Structure formats: structure tokens, C-alpha cells
Image: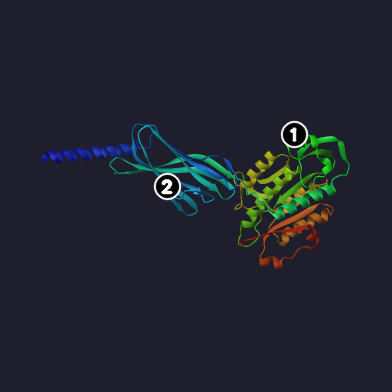
């Protein structure tokens, strides 16, 4: 009997010692990281969330539970071990022998533009006798930019056609036929006389010459992200961001330089977007990153400040496109004052809205904006 009691005491002492040792050293030399497989992804792309855990000591861990949260904009293709509130919360369990490594990749789909970070992973384990639950937080440093959605609609094609037509009308008719600015792919609006048949034969597709011109060939885009209703809805603001990104890409494909000004604030530095010239697709992609990082929850700069600061600089006939789902009297008055100060300024206001929005029937459009106004109607509602 005494032997049994002594044995039990020894076991209890060893168990307590073991539990105490695990409590103190379980997370020694344990490296945990959760990160995105890439830093930049397109809307709708499939990426991977990569879990890594490495136990660099001889002490084994009976199990290791990793918990981390991911914004609902990034949806896991495998929804096992997922709980949902404001974010997705994933919980994975694995075993970690001494000096072992674990890597798991989880596919996910990018469903909303934005800037997202992994900043923390919570890990929990226990000792060999399951006497104590041991937990700790591990810092991570991984971020992901999801670019705005690229949209292709009849309205966008109409806007592109209107833009190119306006630019061609305003450009100086004196194009220098002896100065070749470059060769690019044929577009439907290019005259047949501009086709470079030698270059076309080499690449197997129609290519056209670009001759130098003294006329302006640039579009200034103003993106107004002021709320458009009292509910502070964001759906049309998101559509506007996608429209701007898609429009800029189409303009660049057509060889048209672009500038972008917006009163939306960057989630990282709080600055508004002001890019005076975009002349390459790489520059457009970089601008797409800035559009992706706009935080609609931040208070915007008054659009009046943006338009009057940059649009009045336009003395060369450059086309100004204002994209704004907000149509209140203050905003309309800003555009009216701009036209009053310079009646010759090329201006078009594109207003994203819903087909069945009954409030538009009460919209009072300033008479001087009637020829500078275009509705961009989409299905849905707030």
C-alpha cells in the first residue's frame, strides 16, 4: 500500500513538473507564420493562405491549434473549421514532434478590392498529460492588395467611344506625317490609311502607325467618393472605383495619357490620390493599387477642393471626366462654377446609379449641366 501511495506521489510530482516545464517552455524555439501567397491580386483571383509552423526544439507538442482571422473579402474555398462574424475565423489543429515542420496551403478567392493584413496568429497547446492549456500570440507581417474589379459593359464602351471622339475633334488637325511616335495594335476607330502593313505581316495582326501631334491627348479623371445617400451606402462608390480603374486601362490601351484625382483617402497614409500623368500600363497598375487602398470609412476631402485645384489648370483642352454617384446641389454647384469660370472647358459628369432608383425622379439637374451629364445605370439597389 505504501509502495502504491509512494508511486502515485512520484507520478503526481513528475506530472506537475512536466506541466510546469511545458507551461514555461512549450513555445520556445517555435516559429509560426501565416501569410498570403502574393502581395497583389486581381478581383476574383484565387490565392493561397500559407500556414507555417516549425518546432526547433526536441520537446514535442501533443497538438498545436492555430487560430487566425481573415476579412470576409477573402473567402476560403474550403470552409471547414471556419466561423464567421465580421471576419472569417479559421482554426486548424496539427501535431508537432520535436524538430519538425508543418506547412499547409489553403486556397481562397478574392471577392472585394481593398488592402488586407495578417497581423496575428493565436497558438494554443497543452502538456503531455493535458493538465494545462497553454496559449500565446505570434506576430505576422503579410499584406494583400486586391485590385478593383475590371468591368466590361456597353456603357463603358460608349464612354470610351465618346472620349476618343471628343479627343479627335479637339486635337490639332496638323499631325506631322513625317514624325513617327510609335506602332501599336489596330483599334476599330483607326483609319485604314494608318495601317503599317510591314509590321502587320510580322506579328500576324493589324498594326498602325502613331504620328506625332501637337494636340492634347489626355483625359483628367476626377473621382468623387462622397456618400450619395443618408444611409452612407458604399455599393455605388465601389462601382465608381471599378469604373475608374477599367476606364483608365481602356484609355491606356488606346494610347491616351490619363491623370487621376480623387478625394478618397488612402488607408495607409490618409492621403488623397493626385496623379498628374499615367503614360504606361505599369503606371495604371500602380494607380490600381492606390485605388484598392482607398478606405471609404475615412472622411473625404471636399470634392470642390480637388476639382478647383486641378481642373482649372487645364488650359490645353484636355478632357475632364468627373465620376460621382453623389448628385446633391452642392456637388452640382461645384461643376456649374467650374463651367462659369471657363465655359470652354471640356467636361463630362458620369453618374453611376441604379435603374429603379425612385429618388432620381426628384433630382434637380442644373440647367447648365444638361449637356455635360451622363447616367451610368446598373442593376441592383442599396
Q: Pointer 2: what residue? A: 91
Q: Pointer 1: what residue? A: 202
The percent position of residue 364, horizontal first and vertical second, equals 74, 65
The mark nearer the N terminus, 1 or 2, is 2
> Would you say 363 lies left or right of 146 here?
right
In this view, the residue farthest toward the right is 174
> Would you say 280 lies left or right of 68 here?
right
* Residue 216: quadrant of the picture: top right
Task: Name the secondary structure under disc 1.
Answer: helix
* Quadrant location of the N terminus in the rendered image: top left
The percent position of residue 170, horizontal first and vertical second, equals 84, 48
Q: Residue at point 67% right, 43% down?
A: 287
Task: Name the secondary structure under disc 2.
Answer: strand
> Would you say 209 lies left or right of 31 here?
right
User: Which is more toward the observer, 265 or 376?
Assistant: 376
* Quadrant location of the C terminus in the rendered image: bottom right
User: Which is more toward the observer, 223 or 113?
Assistant: 113
Give the mark toward the camera: 1 or 2. 1
Q: Give the color scheme: rainbow, by chain, secondary structure or one colour.
A: rainbow
The percent position of residue 181, horizontal first and vertical second, equals 80, 36
Amino acid at each position: 500500500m505504501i509502495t502504491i501511495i509512494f508511486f502515485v506521489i512520484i507520478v503526481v510530482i513528475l506530472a506537475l513538473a512536466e506541466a510546469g516545464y511545458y507551461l514555461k517552455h512549450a513555445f520556445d524555439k517555435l516559429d509560426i507564420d501565416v501569410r498570403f501567397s502574393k502581395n497583389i491580386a486581381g478581383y476574383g483571383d484565387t490565392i493561397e493562405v500559407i500556414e507555417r509552423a516549425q518546432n526547433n526544439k526536441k520537446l514535442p507538442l501533443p497538438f498545436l491549434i492555430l487560430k487566425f482571422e481573415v476579412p470576409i473579402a477573402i473567402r476560403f474555398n474550403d470552409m471547414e473549421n471556419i466561423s464567421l462574424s465580421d471576419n472569417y475565423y479559421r482554426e486548424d489543429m496539427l501535431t508537432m514532434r520535436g524538430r519538425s515542420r508543418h506547412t499547409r496551403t489553403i486556397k481562397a478567392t478574392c471577392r472585394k478590392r481593398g488592402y488586407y493584413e495578417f497581423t496575428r496568429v493565436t497558438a494554443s497547446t497543452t502538456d503531455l498529460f493535458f493538465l494545462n492549456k497553454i496559449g500565446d500570440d505570434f506576430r505576422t507581417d503579410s499584406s494583400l492588395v486586391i485590385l478593383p474589379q475590371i468591368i466590361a459593359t456597353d456603357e463603358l464602351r460608349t464612354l470610351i467611344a465618346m472620349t476618343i471622339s471628343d479627343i479627335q475633334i479637339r486635337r490639332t488637325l496638323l499631325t506631322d506625317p513625317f514624325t513617327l511616335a510609335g506602332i501599336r495594335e489596330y483599334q476599330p476607330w483607326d483609319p485604314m490609311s494608318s495601317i503599317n502593313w510591314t509590321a502587320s505581316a510580322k506579328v500576324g495582326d493589324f498594326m498602325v502607325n502613331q504620328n506625332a501631334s501637337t494636340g492634347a491627348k489626355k483625359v483628367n479623371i476626377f473621382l468623387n467618393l462622397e456618400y450619395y445617400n443618408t444611409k452612407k451606402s458604399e455599393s455605388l462608390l465601389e462601382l465608381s472605383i471599378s469604373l475608374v480603374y477599367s476606364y483608365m486601362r481602356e484609355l491606356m490601351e488606346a494610347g491616351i495619357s490619363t491623370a487621376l484625382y480623387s478625394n478618397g483617402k488612402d488607408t495607409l497614409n490618409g492621403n488623397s490620390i493626385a496623379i498628374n500623368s499615367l503614360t504606361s500600363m505599369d503606371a495604371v497598375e500602380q494607380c490600381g493599387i492606390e485605388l484598392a487602398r482607398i478606405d471609404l470609412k475615412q472622411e473625404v476631402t471636399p470634392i470642390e477642393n480637388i476639382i478647383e485645384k486641378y481642373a482649372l489648370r487645364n488650359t490645353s483642352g484636355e478632357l475632364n471626366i468627373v465620376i460621382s454617384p453623389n448628385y446633391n446641389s452642392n456637388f452640382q454647384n461645384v461643376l456649374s462654377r467650374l463651367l462659369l469660370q471657363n465655359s470652354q472647358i471640356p467636361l463630362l459628369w458620369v453618374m453611376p446609379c441604379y435603374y429603379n432608383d425612385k429618388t432620381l425622379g426628384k433630382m434637380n439637374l442644373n440647367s447648365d449641366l444638361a449637356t455635360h451629364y451622363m447616367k451610368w445605370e446598373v442593376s441592383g439597389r442599396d
